Image (cartoon, grey):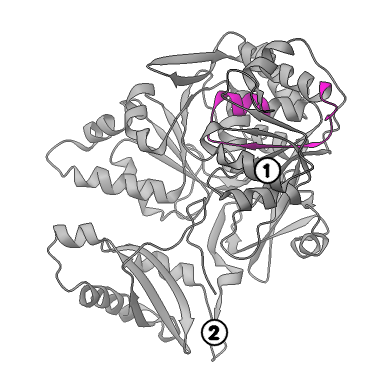
């Protein structure tokens, strides 16, 4: 069957994988399981419910952590030709209400961990007609029960869906400026999830660790996972990652660089007395073979570092506006230092050092932001804002961000990321931001205080200055760092764990 919409994906998965486990998750002290057939059945019940409420085609928001209820509701919304609006569960209630209003949301599914949002919504979002708790057993105070509604609306469902129509509205958690509502069509998401065969065997066990409102998790962990027939284990809390890795024993996980870096610090802390592959087995449950990295820049050295522990890191590159994957390294087709080869449905070009991308994954535009849309898209080309190059074999290399570029008084252009990546190789440097300050390049560093304590480094600023002096000794004059600020606290980050740059 042709796969052009999310309804096609869920139906294909049920037809192909049927009674195989689609999801595993903890339910009290037991491991619960949902099959591909159950996922399809429950998604169709949600579609029928949306139509019964007279909200077909409307915007429906989801707030919460990764749960089976969230996932089946997402597919239920989108399979009814309505628009799913995943919202970041970590935002304060007033910020959530602002996004719900901006996105013209008329129905809300929420997780009990954000019960506080309900009162704010009732007060500030008059257009929301129905509120559904993903966990409540019974209806109470006008709040509907997901469980009851799914039981009441069982049955087949079908409706016409145009692959080009709006499917999902995702708000970017930008590192600068106001978040934008990225409009992604059924084709955008479906093509991104299905166009590249990564040769992942059916039944491979994965574990979802990233926030589900982020498109990297949504497209790769959830939509692609369903399409290729993996069994996804749901991590119930960031506090239980280690315990859940041992419980579910995944073979594959998707991670952002910050998490990869912190995992490596823990692996290294085990020392050299135990063989590295044994350390990895103890840390990851014994079966982990592959980590897919995305969401930000990862120092390519980590690929070699994890290989010593018997784990392959496949680095990719993408952005929400591209549904999100633009390029990916594969086990049998990769280049160190690159962020992978362009996906089969993408073409790229370089304009004034900036990477531009065209293809079926490129967004429809920003919701109700025509000026920002016109700025980002030109003749179907998405201006990524990333600086870099594409080699003759279509491998992509990133050198920095256009908007972060430092333009010095002598006219030289300096990419702060390039300097940050060099300096952050030092164990003492935990986080770093490089910027221009008073016509010189300044580095603001949050040191690894635990490392300093372990290595008995008493004068941290002096040691950091030594690191900068070593970098400066080989750097061109205009790229030298001449000012140092030492932080006592971590930098503020967005929910994708990227440092927020205050320019």
Which residue is disc 2 drawn over? 412
Which residue is disc 1 drawn over? 121
Count of residue discs: 2
- Compared with residue 235, is residue 458 higher up or lower down, i.e. above or below? below
Q: Magenta part of the protein: which range? A: 52-73
- Most extreme residue toward the bottom is 410
The residue at 16%/60% (across/down) is: 453
Q: Is residue 1 visible?
A: no
- Is residue 269 or residue 301 the one in the foreground? 269
Q: Point out the image quarter for the C terminus.
A: bottom right
Question: Label 1: how many residues lie within 10 Å, few (<14), some (14-19) or many (20+)?
Answer: many
Position of 62 compared to 474: left or right?
right
Which of labels 2 and 1 is toward the front? 1
First in sequence, mark 2 or 1: give its number. 1
The residue at 18%/42% (across/down) is: 270
Q: Percent from the top left, x then y, of residue 58?
A: 82, 36
The residue at 65%/57% (across/down) is: 179
Q: Percent from the top left, x then y, of residue 200?
A: 52, 26
């Amino acid at each position: 069957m042709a796969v052009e919409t999310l309804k096609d994906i869920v139906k294909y998965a049920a037809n192909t994988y049927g009674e195989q486990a689609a999801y595993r998750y903890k339910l009290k002290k037991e491991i619960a399981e949902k099959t591909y057939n159950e996922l399809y059945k429950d998604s169709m019940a949600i579609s029928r419910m949306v139509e019964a409420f007279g909200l077909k085609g409307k915007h429906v928001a989801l707030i919460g952590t990764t749960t089976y209820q969230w996932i089946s509701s997402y597919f239920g919304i989108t399979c009814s030709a309505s628009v799913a609006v995943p919202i970041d569960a970590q935002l304060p209630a007033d910020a959530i209400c602002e996004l719900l209003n901006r996105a013209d949301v008329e129905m809300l599914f929420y997780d009990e961990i954000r019960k506080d949002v309900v009162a704010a919504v009732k007060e500030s979002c008059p257009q929301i007609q129905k509120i559904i708790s993903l966990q409540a057993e019974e209806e109470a105070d006008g709040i509907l029960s997901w469980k009851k509604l799914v039981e009441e609306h069982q049955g087949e469902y079908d409706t016409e869906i145009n692959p080009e129509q709006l499917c999902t509205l995702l708000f970017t958690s930008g590192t600068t400026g106001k978040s934008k509502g990225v409009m992604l069509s059924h084709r955008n998401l479906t093509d991104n999830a299905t166009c590249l065969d990564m040769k992942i065997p059916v039944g491979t066990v994965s574990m979802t660790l990233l926030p589900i409102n982020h498109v990297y998790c949504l497209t790769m962990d959830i939509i692609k996972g369903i399409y290729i027939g993996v069994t996804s284990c749901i991590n119930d809390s960031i506090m239980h990652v280690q315990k859940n890795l041992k419980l579910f024993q995944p073979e594959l996980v998707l991670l952002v660089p910050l998490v990869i870096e912190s995992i490596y610090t823990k692996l290294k802390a085990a020392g050299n007395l135990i063989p590295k592959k044994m350390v990895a087995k103890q840390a990851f449950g014994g079966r982990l073979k592959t980590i897919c990295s995305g969401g930000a820049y990862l120092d390519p050295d980590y690929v070699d570092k994890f290989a010593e522990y018997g784990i392959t890191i496949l680095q990719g590159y993408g952005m929400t506006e591209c549904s999100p994957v633009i390029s990916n390294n594969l086990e049998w087709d990769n280049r160190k230092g690159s962020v992978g080869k362009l996906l089969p449905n993408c073409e790229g070009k370089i304009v004034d050092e900036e990477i531009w991308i065209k293809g079926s994954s490129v967004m429809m535009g920003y919701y109700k932001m025509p000026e920002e849309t016109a700025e980002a898209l030109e003749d179907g080309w998405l201006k990524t804002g990333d600086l870099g190059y594409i080699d003759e074999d279509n491998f992509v290399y990133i050198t920095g961000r256009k908007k972060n570029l430092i333009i010095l008084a002598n006219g030289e252009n300096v990419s702060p990321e390039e300097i940050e990546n060099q300096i952050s190789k030092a164990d003492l440097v935990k986080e770093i931001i490089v910027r221009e300050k008073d016509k010189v390049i300044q580095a603001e560093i949050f040191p690894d205080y635990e490392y300093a304590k372990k290595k008995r480094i008493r004068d941290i600023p002096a040691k950091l200055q030594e690191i900068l002096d070593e970098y400066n000794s080989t750097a061109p004059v205009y790229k030298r760092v001449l000012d140092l600020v030492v932080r006592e606290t971590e930098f503020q980050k967005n929910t994708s764990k990227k440092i927020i740059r205050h320019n």
